[in-house]
Amino acid sequence: MTKKTFGRRIRNLIAAFRGLPPESGISCLKKTKPLGTSIATLLKKLNGVKITPQQTIQQNWSSIIGENMAKRCHPVKILNNDTLVIHSFDAIIRSELQMQKLKILENLHQLPHCAKISDIRFVAHKSIDVA
């Protein structure tokens, strides 16, 4: 059994009878689409989305910095397309990362989309806004 829907004119007549405001939006004129169609359209749009350097770094973080260090720090953002900001909770970890800076940069340059990164900043937990 199919469900019948009333047109806008009939719905506005019923709304006037009930003392409600009439429908005037454009969205009432469009028919609803099945969810599967909307998801398929969204997936087509997402297939063309570029992967950013930040996403690449997030996905490969433990291989860039090492398994033990990856648990103690994480990348926050990339400033001016060339400076990676790494957030760490501990000053000792920050100093150790500072000593390994060149090795980290070498590992970053091996990843796709990350060749432009030329500097790394290590910041404490509370001073995350470095700009």
Image (spheres, rainbow, N blue to C red):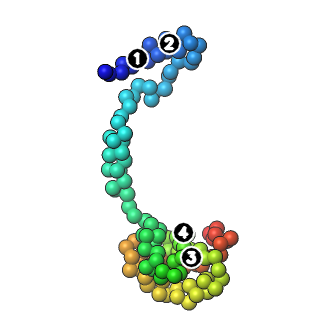
Q: Which mark is residue 14?
A: 2
Name the amino acid type tagged 1.
Phe
**Element under label 3?**
strand
First reached walking from the N terminus: tag 3 or tag 2: 2
Work out how far the residue at label 1 is from the one at label 2, CA to CA, in angstroms: 10 Å
Residue at the image position 32 percent from the left and 22 percent from the top: 2
Determine whether the residue tagged by mark 4 lies in a helix, strand or loop: strand
Q: Which residue is mark 3?
A: 73
Q: Amino acid at mark 2?
A: Ile
The three-letter code of the residue at mark 4 reads Lys
In primary-sequence order, the first of circles 4 and 1 is 1
Q: Is residue 19 above or below residue 106?
A: above
**Residue type of the residue flagged with mark 3:** Cys
Looking at the rendered structure, the secondary structure element under dot 2 is helix
Would residue 84 be seen by someone viewing this image from the given angle? Answer: yes
The residue pinned by badge 1 equals: 6
Taking the spot 46% from the left edge, 75% from the top edge, the residue there is: 61
How far from the left and from the top, in percent, is residue 39?
Answer: 36, 45
Instruction: Point out the frontmost of discs 3 and 4.
Output: 3
Provide residue 102's location: percent of width, then percent of height. 49, 87
